[in-house]
Structure formats: C-alpha cells, structure tokens
C-alpha cells in the first residue's frame, strides 16, 4: 500500500492505495468523491475527467500514487458553496443533460476549456469535448450551453 | 358476434381463416373465444398478444370493451426500448 | 506490482535492470494504464519517470530541439516555436486521443508502445528525429525508425530506456505535415497515417521524406514516394506518382479498423494531401 | 374540471421549459448512480466469463479462487433456483450459464471479495474446463443448413416446416394481394439489406448493490424498471417477490438496454452466500460483450410504384438475429416496416434467429430502425428512378386517420402528414445543397406503449405536493411529472417534489420503456392529482355546507361553482391542507391502471451529408428532426429526445457495429473501437415539434423517446446516395464500405 498526500478541490487529504489503483478509484472509494464516473476505464469516454495541477486528464488513466503532491480538481469543487458556477447554471437552464452520467466530466472539461479559451468557436468546443461521450443529448444543447456561458462570462469580465 | 382479424401467420392455427367470429363483449372474451374455437391459437395467445380495437392498441387490458361492430385485430404483443 | 519513482535515469535503469518479471516505464500512462486495467499487461515493476530532472522540458539543442520523455502532447501544442518549426510532428502528437489524453500522453510513450498506428511516429521518422537511449551498457543515440520492431515490440534491450527525443534543425524553406485517416473526427486509432517532410529550393523540392503508419507491422519510410516528388514542384503528375508509390509500399492487414484495399488506397490519398500541406508550409517559410 | 376531461389549451405550467428538480444534484456530482453507493461491510464482486462463443462447460473448479485471501464466496449456476421455465429460464441462462456457454462473455461464475482488486484476482483463479463447440454469429449463416444448432428445441410452432432449428419464431402479416399490386406498378424494385448489431451505448455500466437477509433482501441498482428486477430476481433466487425490495438509483442512460437483468441476481446470490452486502459493477468490456445489443438483420424488400408516385404494393422479409435466446423483435420490424404508408397490398414476414451472441435487449423502438432503413431506401431509389420528389411521394402515400395500417387496424388520429408538411415548409428542405453534398429524407414510426402504472400524490400541510412515481427518470421525467401535477393542482411547479418510489412503497410499475413514461405515468399523475383535487373540493364543500359538486378547483383555490352554489370566499390549497387532519384525514390522490391509449408517433427527418469520395468518409453537415409529440410537456426535453435519437441513428448508420472475429469473439468491446458519435462529428440538430394530440391522454401526450431513432439510418443512406451516387445496402456505411462501393461503380 502506498501512502499518498494530495490536495483535492483545495483540501489537503491523504489516502492509502494499492499501486494498481487509479486516481479515479481513490477519489471514489477512498475519498468518497463519486462525482467522477467510470464509463469505460480506458480514457475513451471522459466521464472521469478531473484536473491535475490545472491540466485536464482522465482520472481512470492516472494512478492514485501519481497524485502525490498534486492538486486535483473534481466536479465537487466547481460550485462555490450554494452558488453554482455559471456553467452549472446554464446546463440546467438549457437542458444540457438528460441522464446526467456524463455531466460531471463535461463540466470539468468545459470549465478547463473556458479558462484557457474564453472565446471558443463552436468547432473548438466540439473538438475539446470529443473525449467526453454523451449518449443522450446528441451534444446540441451541451454545445449551446457552453457557447452561451462563454459569452456571458466575457460580458461579465 | 365480433369479427376478429388475425395476422396472416396465425392462419395455420385457425383452419386457414384470417377472420374469426367470436361472441365477446371485452378483450378477455375475444381471446377466450378464439382459443375455444381454435385451440391451436392457445400457445400464441398465452405467450402474449395485443388487441387493436377500433384502432386503439390494447396491450394488456382484458376488460377493455368490444362492441359487435368494433374493428378488432389481433396483434403481436407490444413492448419498447 | 511495485511502483517506483526514481529521481535519475541512472536509478531508473538500475531498478529496471534488476527487476524481475514484467517491467514498464510510466510517463503519461495512457497506454500502460489501459493495458493494466484491461489485464493485457500487468507489470510487476512500474517505474514512473516523471520525478527525474528535466523530463518535462522542451529545450533548444543547437538549432534543433530536445523534448523530455514526460513532455505531454498539450505542452508541445502550447509551445509556439516548436509548433512553428515542426508543425507536422506537433500535430501528429496532438491527434493522439482526446484533450484529456493530451494532458498526459507523450511522444516517447507513443513510440515505446510499439503500435504500428502510433500517430507521432511517422511524423518523427519523416522529421529524422532521434532518441537518446540509456541502459546497463551505457548510452546510445538511435533513429526513431529503428525503435519499433513489430506490433508491441521495440529494439530496446532489458533495462534500456529512452531519455529524450531530438528533432533536428528545421532548416530553411522546409515544412512538414502529418495526416491520418480515422472513421470519426476524433478518438480513433489511425487506420492510415502519413507524414511528409520536405525542403525547397525556390519552388523545387530538393529533399523529402515520406513515412507511413498503420500499413505495415512497423512505421515505413517510403523512399520511392520521396523520389517521386524530389526535383518536382509538386505538380499533379508528381502527386500521382507519390500516391502510387505510397500505396505500393503498403503491406497492411484487414482488421476491425480497415481493410487491406482501403488502407492501401487511402495511404496514397493521404500522401498527396500531406505533401501539399508540407509544400505550402515550406513555401510560406521561405 | 371533470375527472376525465381532456385539456388542450390554457396551460400554465405544462409546455414551459422548467428547470429539472434533479439538475442541481447532477451538475454538482451529488446524484447517486448505480455505482455510487456503499454499505457497511460491503464486498466487491467480479464475474468470470466465457472466452468462447459456444462451449460445453465440463467442469468449474473454484477452489483456488476460494483459497485466495480476502475472498468470501464464489457462486455458479448451482446457486440459483432450479425448475424455472420459459422466459424466466432464458433470463437465468443468460445471467449465469448452465450446461453451455452460448456466447463470448457469457457469465459462468462470480466471486465476492473484500476489495475490487482481490475480486478481479480471484476471478482469474476460477478454472473452467470447456469443450469447444462450433459457433455461428452471422444471421444468414445461422439459418444455413450446416449451421450448428445452438439450443435445440427452442423453436415454437409458428416456424414453418423445414427451417433450421436456429429459426425459433415466425411472423407474417399484411393484407391484399401483393402480386396483383406489383403487376399494377410501373417500376418494381427488389433489393436486400443488412444491418449489424449496435449497442445502446449508455455511458453508465450496469451496477448494483445487493444485501440479502434471511429470505428477504434489498437491492439498489440502475435499471429502467425495478419492479421487473424484483420479479425476475425473486424467481431466480427462489424468493417471494414482496420480500425483495428494489430501489432504482439514478440511471446513466438505458435506451432499452436496462430493461433486462444481468448482474443483479448474481450480486444477490453472492450476498446470500456471504451474508454481506455485495457491490457488482460491470466494466465497459462486459457491457459490450454480455448485455443486450440490438439484433443484426438481413432483409429483402420489394416495392412497386406507379409513375405518379402511388405505391402499389410492398413486401418485406426480415431475418433478425437476437443472440442465443428467442426474442429478436422481428415482429416489430415487420409491423413497422410499411406503417407510414397507406398500402392496398402489403405483406411482411419476420424470422427470429438464434446465434452465438449475447441476448439482444430492447434498443429505442426495437426493430423499427432497421425496417425503415430497408424500406425507405427502396422508396428513395424508386423516386430517383421515376424522377419524383421523395417528400411528395411520401405525402401521397402517407398513412392518416381512417386509412388501414400495414399491420391491420384502421388508424386513429396520427400526425405523419403533419410532419411531412412541416418538413416541406422547413427552410432546410428548400435550401440548395452544396457541391459534394446530398440530401436525404426518411419517415419513421413507433407504436409507443402504456403499461401498468401506479402513482401516489400526497399533499403536505403547507399545500405542497409529494409525488411518487415508479418509472425511473432517465431523461428529465421528474420535471414533466411535477409540471402535470402542478398544472392540475394549480400550484407552482416548485411546490411539487417528484420521487421515484421503491418497490415497497408503490404499486407495480412496468419498466420505463416504450416511450411510456410521460404518457402513462403522466396520465396517472394527472388522474392522481384530480383525485386529490376532488378530496380538496369535498373538504371545502363540507366547510361551506354545500354539495361537493357545487365546488370547483381553479388555480389552487376551491371556489363555489357559480352563484347558485352560494357566496363564499375561495379557499387556497394551503388553508385546506393545514386542517386536513381534522377535516377527514390526510389528503392523498392516487391512480393505478394500465392505460391503453398510448398514441403512436411518426417522424420525418431531413439530412445533408457530404462524402469524401477519396476516403469514403461521410460528414453530416445539417440535420433536422420533425416529430409528432402530441403535446410537449417540457419542450426542452422533447427536443433532447429528438436530438439524442437522431444522433444514435447517425452512429448506427455510419460507424457503430459489433465486429466478431472468426473465433466468435467480439473484437471491439471498448469505446475505442465501438465508435459512437463524438461532439466533433456532428452539427447542431434542428428540431420541429409537431403537436397532433393523442386522444388517449388528458393533455394529448404521445411518447417521444423512441421514434427519433427510426428515420436516420435511411435518411443518411439516401443522403449518401445523393452525394456520392452509390447506394449502400449494408450498415454501417463505414468508409471502407463506401469506398468499395465507389470503386465497384467506377470499375463495373
């Protein structure tokens, strides 16, 4: 077992893990943060998306041990207390989710997109999210929600 | 009497007929009547069928009313995804 | 499974040399972890190289570049000068997987995984990239094209590891490009990949390298394809000859991703398209 | 309002794009899906699966697995009930193999251990000795004389004599005389089509948590129907149904694939054996290999048309492979095939064929999309060869109220013509296509379904409402239910909380399938609310000392029905509920029934596609869905159903397929090579909601979930034909297939 010290959503945490366990396993099973989902376990669906030192990654393709000394961001850290992030608000308003299983990963991914590219084109959003599979929506309302949030955020800043 | 239309695949179990007349006031009686007249239909009906009465597809309700002039079609049981 | 985080290449080699059972080096982990979780390869010893000094650097090396073994695709794409020098190599790496995969995947990993369909490998071969290798018997420099020896296999000996990737000086009036064919727009493994790297004198091509991926057990450097366009201004006849030579070099298989006929045909199509892009880039660079 | 009155105008909440009540939980990661729960002392399980497509199980040795530290129990078929028959036996055979493994991925044993890693390690220690048998995975080969017999004696008596034992059911329907019809035609086209199996592809793998006590148990799982899970699991474990309580978790997509059980009985058996709670979660590979994809098909179509576009006759033969068990939805394929058209002569035949593949499960309008692919392709080709506009031809032959359906009955009020008219009027249909692009259209049809339904609506003291429904919410149905309840009660939408009740707290509910939720649970909700309103009116009447019938309910107030009823101040709902304990007791409305008026739904899709003739790659550049929703309760989620179905259809048309090797093993059991559409593959999906009210629902609702997947396969094939000049008759229209077709055309 490996002892790992890390920071998740700004909180210092520690856990023990088998070297074979992934960061996704550690988040879900050790830390009780079940927002990140396992849809494939092979980095193909993006439902487990988190940020590691600010970089968007699939937590199913990161070992728990690799989180040592890192800063992890998950869907649970997107809202500020009871105040939702504009992306979260917009996803609800636009019906940009149906079953909701891909939603945490898509929110983590789009938040990361908008931090890097505040004024993305539709094509840019679509390619950025190509690794986040959604089987319910056909992506239409997701793309619209992201584009509109980006516009709102630009207006606000 | 009510005229009941069978799907053509069932003719083999109804003496070659695809319309059978039964004495029935509801869907349950239609099905019972069919089996009484043509026992060969029993397995298929037991396995589950729907009945269209005047264009309305009755998937399971045996108490749904059937009138003498109703258009009645036996249909394969409906399900969905 | 043992998990190690050595702080130097020497330590890493020492661990690898003495390791019993299956050893894997871990950089981005986008292949190693997939194989681990799918029970394809469960390493007994896993050596995480990311704690070694300098592995995350992209550095000038003369007029060329040294790229550390843990540099991610995203870091390459974000590097403006590297991207303008070697757009084909950077784009090839950028095509590997999703945004999430780009946050982790590395050139070295893409090479060492030994997949015939690895996107960055034809681009590196066309670019004449080399890798530094270190191991129990000392260090050596190896051409990228000499690393893969077959599907999932490399020429690296037990205990050997790559310590950096080197891209040569870009040179003037030159450009490279990489294209691949996938059924969707993203997220697939290349059915065919093609890289073209060329240099111009005026409008005439003086030097060219054409490399193909996913059409043979290893990456192919197609000299006939290069010859077809050297000395030309990439006119239609040259492009047709290039396509024919690229297709002729193919030795593919039929599998779940494509047929022999399809791969052979599309290799020619991609060679033509990639050559045009490389040519435009070379012209723009002059 | 009278109890049975149909309401079509003056909606206050219905028709609004309200925010879904579970939205907050789903955007913050709080929502609890199948794999998100834990129980004290919980074990983790893993399933041992056959690597062979067809093999006799000679021996299973579990001793090494049991000896591994941390392993608490192993189960095999011997740990399940004996003496089952019919459908229950088939389900059990599929859940855990008996004498034979029938497909690659078929479960043969399962282990429970103290961690997921130990369970996986133990799984590898279970030694299974197989005697490998010949296998077949292709539908046409499975019907061939030399095909191995997969399960002898399965065929029922509908199967015509002389057919292979793998043909297990037969359907034939239609009317008129097709030969006479073909004789009347100016052009007859006959062609054959094939479609590969596709998977529902929900992003959430199956997951459950089981806890068995003595003779009773609790199960938490992601399912489209927990009463069905209760019924099947009880049978497989030999329990009394009421002793097993099943709670539906949030569900991460189903599309029909979560109407069956796979791992739930296994988790229960392990829990019973170990006396500990057991969690079982499938991997993606297990989902592809061992849960239900749709059927693969082989189809022959013959259609005759006059020069003026009149279809004179249609005939179809539909062979569906549904895995190693009977149940391929060939009768729906047959019945849906010509449903959009008013035909004098029509005949359709269906064959249900066994093969060494996983048991097919329902997938969004099961059976219908394949039929539409074949029939609508032939109609398109007829239009092309006769120089006719494909939309006008469809309008000319369209089914409408009073015409005779291809499967027999006379249509009630239906909206196909309205979708075609809307398509004709849509700017998409008249926009010029760009060079290299082609346009295709197609119609699609699905029956929709009612089914057993129970709903309870309890009023709280403060005048708010708690609505309990039993149909798992897959795509926002809690919002629609709350909208309908709020509409009836005359209270704000936010004052209704909708809960998906567990099996112990509500009457039976059929699975969330057949596009039935907004229709049937919606109807039940409206009636339960009207039931509660009646009680509220009664309380007001008693207070005023007037007749109950003299009280009406308006906008959340009880009012005297008119001047003759007397002069009283209206009483708001909260005043009535505040005192309900003292005026007769709690006020609860409820409704239990099997509503039979699910209106069918038709759609017309328009698609523009661009084909790269050098690589065979198809890009969808514009897409418009036009569908009859009857009445859209929440238009945003209706559009979502249209868009999602269309995109699943796009995937089916272009890239999705089950690929089996010569060894009978599934080769693409990951999302890497099972290629569902990604965001960058697609344009926006435009939608038009047509509302032709369903007479069988108080607000006119028709189910909308399924029909949207029916037209895309053909619409895209027709667009590809227009763009590239080649007709693809086999799905998926993958780049190698398109390139091969182009090559064949060029070289003869």
Image (spheres, rainbow, N blue to C red):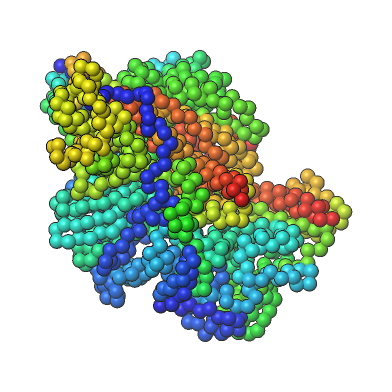
Camera-side residue of D340 and D224: D224
Residue at image location 46% in from the left, 71% down from the top: A12
Residue at image location 52% in from the left, 70% down from the top: A70
In the orientation shown, which residue stands out farthest toward the right?
Answer: C202
Whole-percent x, y for residue B61 in the image: 20, 31
Whole-percent x, y for residue D606 in the image: 52, 30
Camera-side residue of D396 and D94: D396
Whole-percent x, y for residue B9 in the image: 27, 28
- Say whether residue D715 is visible: no
Reply above or below: D39 against B51: below
All told, the count of numbered labels is: 0
Residue at image location 66% in from the left, 53% down from the top: C179
Q: Quadrant of the C terminus of chain B?
A: top left
**Residue B63 falls in which quadrant of the image?**
top left
- Say whether residue D222 is visible: yes
Reply above or below: D424 against C60: above
Residue at image location 57% in from the left, 76% down from the top: C51
């Amino acid at each position: 077992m490996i002892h790992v010290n890390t920071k998740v959503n700004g909180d210092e945490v520690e856990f023990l893990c088998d070297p074979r366990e992934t960061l996704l396993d550690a988040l879900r099973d050790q830390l009780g943060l079940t927002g990140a989902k396992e849809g494939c376990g092979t980095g193909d669906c993006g439902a487990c998306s988190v940020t590691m030192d600010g970089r968007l990654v699939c937590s199913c393709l990161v070992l728990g041990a690799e989180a040592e000394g890192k800063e992890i961001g998950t869907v649970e850290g997107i809202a500020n207390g009871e105040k939702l992030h504009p992306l979260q608000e917009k996803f609800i308003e636009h019906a940009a989710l149906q079953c909701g299983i891909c939603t945490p990963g898509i929110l983590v991914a789009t938040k990361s997109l908008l931090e890097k590219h505040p004024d993305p084109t539709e094509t840019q959003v679509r390619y950025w999210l190509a690794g986040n599979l959604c089987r319910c929506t056909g992506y239409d309302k997701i793309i619209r929600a992201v584009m509109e949030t980006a516009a709102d955020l630009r207006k606000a800043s | 009497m009510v005229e009941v239309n069978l799907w053509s695949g069932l003719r083999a179990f109804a003496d070659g007929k695809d319309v059978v007349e039964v004495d029935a006031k509801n869907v349950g009686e239609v099905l019972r009547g069919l089996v009484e007249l043509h026992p060969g239909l029993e397995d298929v009906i037991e396995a589950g069928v729907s009945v269209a009465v005047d264009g309305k597809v009755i998937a399971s309700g045996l108490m749904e009313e059937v009138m003498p002039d109703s258009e009645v079609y036996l249909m394969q049981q409906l399900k969905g995804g | 499974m043992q998990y190690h985080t050595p702080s130097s290449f020497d330590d890493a080699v020492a661990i690898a040399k003495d390791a019993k059972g299956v050893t894997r080096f871990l950089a981005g982990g986008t292949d190693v972890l997939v194989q681990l979780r799918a029970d394809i390869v469960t390493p007994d010893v896993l050596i995480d190289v990311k704690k070694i000094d300098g592995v995350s650097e992209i550095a000038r090396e003369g007029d060329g570049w040294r790229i550390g073994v843990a540099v991610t695709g995203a870091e390459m794409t974000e590097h403006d000068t590297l991207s303008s020098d070697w757009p084909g190599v950077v784009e090839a790496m950028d095509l590997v997987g999703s945004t999430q995969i780009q946050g982790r995947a590395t050139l070295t990993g893409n090479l060492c995984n030994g997949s015939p369909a690895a996107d960055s490998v034809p681009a590196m071969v066309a670019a004449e990239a080399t890798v530094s290798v270190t191991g129990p018997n000392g260090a050596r420099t190896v051409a990228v094209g000499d690393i893969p020896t077959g599907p999932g296999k490399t020429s690296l000996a037990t205990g050997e590891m790559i310590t950096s990737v080197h891209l040569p000086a870009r040179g003037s009036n030159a450009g490279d490009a990489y294209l691949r064919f996938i059924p969707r727009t993203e997220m697939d493994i290349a059915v065919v990949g093609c890289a073209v790297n060329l240099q111009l004198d005026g409008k005439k091509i003086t030097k060219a390298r054409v490399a193909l991926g996913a059409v043979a057990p290893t990456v192919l450097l197609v000299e006939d394809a290069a010859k077809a366009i050297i000395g030309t201004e990439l006119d239609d006849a040259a492009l047709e000859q290039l396509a024919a030579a690229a297709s002729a070099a193919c030795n593919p298989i039929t599998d779940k991703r494509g047929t022999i006929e399809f791969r052979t045909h599309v290799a020619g199509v991609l060679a033509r398209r990639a050559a045009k892009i490389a040519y435009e880039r070379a012209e723009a660079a002059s | 309002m009278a109890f049975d009155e149909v309401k079509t105008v003056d909606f206050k909440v219905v028709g609004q794009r309200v925010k879904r009540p579970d939205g907050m939980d789903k955007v913050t990661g709080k929502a609890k899906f199948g794999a998100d729960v834990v129980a004290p002392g919980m074990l983790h399980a893993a399933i041992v699966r056959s690597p062979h497509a067809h093999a006799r199980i000679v021996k299973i040795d579990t001793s090494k697995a049991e000896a591994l530290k941390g392993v608490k129990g192993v189960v095999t078929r011997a740990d399940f009930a004996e003496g089952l028959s019919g459908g229950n036996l088939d389900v059990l055979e599929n859940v855990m193999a008996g004498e034979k493994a029938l497909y690659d991925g078929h479960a043969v044993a399962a282990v429970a251990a103290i961690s997921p890693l130990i369970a996986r390690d133990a799984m590898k220690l279970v030694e299974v000795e197989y005697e490998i048998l010949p296998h077949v995975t292709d539908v046409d080969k499975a019907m061939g004389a030399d095909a191995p017999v997969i399960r002898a004696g399965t065929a029922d008596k509908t199967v015509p004599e002389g057919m292979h034992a793998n043909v297990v059911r037969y359907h034939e329907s239609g009317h008129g005389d097709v030969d006479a019809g073909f004789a009347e035609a100016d052009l007859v086209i006959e062609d054959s089509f094939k479609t590969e199996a596709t998977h529902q592809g929900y992003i959430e793998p199956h997951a459950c948590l089981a806890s068995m006590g003595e003779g009773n148990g609790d199960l938490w799982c992601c399912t489209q129907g927990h009463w069905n899970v209760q019924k099947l699991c009880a049978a497989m474990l030999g329990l009394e149904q009421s002793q097993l309580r099943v709670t539906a978790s949030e569900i991460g997509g189903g599309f029909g694939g979560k109407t069956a059980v796979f791992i739930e009985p296994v988790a229960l058996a392990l829990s019973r054996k170990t006396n500990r709670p057991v969690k079982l979660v499938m991997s993606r590979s297990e989902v592809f290999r061992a849960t239900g994809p749709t059927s693969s098909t082989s189809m022959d179509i013959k259609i005759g048309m006059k020069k003026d576009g009149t279809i004179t006759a249609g005939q179809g033969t539909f062979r569906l492979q549904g895995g190693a068990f009977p149940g391929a939805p060939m009768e729906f394929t047959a019945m849906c095939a010509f449903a959009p058209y008013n035909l004098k002569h029509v005949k359709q035949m269906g064959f249900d064929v066994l093969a060494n593949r996983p048991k097919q499960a329902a997938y969004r309008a099961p059976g219908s999309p394949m039929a539409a692919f074949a029939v609508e392709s032939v109609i398109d080709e007829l239009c092309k060869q006769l120089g006719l506009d494909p939309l006008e031809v469809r309008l000319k032959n369209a089914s409408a109220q009073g015409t005779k359906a291809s499967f027999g009955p006379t249509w009630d009020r239906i909206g196909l013509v309205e979708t075609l008219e809307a398509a004709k009027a849509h700017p998409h249909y008249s926009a010029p296509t760009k060079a290299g692009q082609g346009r295709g259209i197609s119609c699609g049809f699905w029956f929709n379904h009612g089914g057993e339904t129970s709903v309870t609506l309890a009023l709280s003291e403060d005048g708010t409402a708690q609505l309990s429904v039993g149909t798992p919410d897959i795509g926002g149905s809690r919002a629609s239910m709350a909208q309908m309840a709020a509409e009836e009660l005359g209270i704000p939408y936010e004052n209704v909380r909708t809960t998906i009740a567990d099996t112990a707290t509500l009457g039976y509910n059929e699975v969330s399938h057949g596009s039935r939720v907004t229709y049937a649970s919606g109807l039940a909700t409206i009636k339960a609310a009207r039931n509660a309103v009646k009680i509220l009116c009664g309380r007001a009447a008693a207070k005023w000392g007037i007749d109950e019938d003299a009280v009406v309910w308006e906008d959340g107030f009880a009012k005297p029905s008119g001047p003759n009823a007397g002069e009283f101040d209206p009483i708001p709902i909260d005043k009535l509920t505040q005192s309900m304990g003292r005026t007769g007791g709690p006020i609860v409305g409820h409704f239990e029934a099997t509503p039979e008026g699910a209106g069918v739904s038709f759609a017309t899709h328009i698609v523009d596609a661009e084909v790269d003739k050098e690589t065979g790659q198809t890009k969808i550049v514009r897409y418009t869905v036009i569908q009859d929703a009857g009445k859209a309760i929440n238009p945003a989620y209706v559009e979502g159903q249209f868009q999602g179905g269309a995109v699943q259809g796009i995937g089916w048309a272009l890239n999705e397929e089950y690929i089996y090797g010569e060894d009978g093993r599934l080769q693409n059991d990951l999302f890497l090579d099972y290629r569902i559409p990604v965001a960058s593959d697609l344009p926006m999906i435009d939608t038009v909601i047509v509302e032709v009210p369903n007479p069988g629902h108080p607000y006119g609702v028709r189910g909308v979930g399924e029909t949207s997947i029916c037209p895309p396969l053909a619409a895209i094939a027709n667009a590809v034909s227009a763009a590239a000049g080649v007709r693809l008759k086999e799905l998926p229209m993958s780049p190698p297939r398109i390139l091969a077709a182009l090559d064949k055309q060029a070289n003869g």
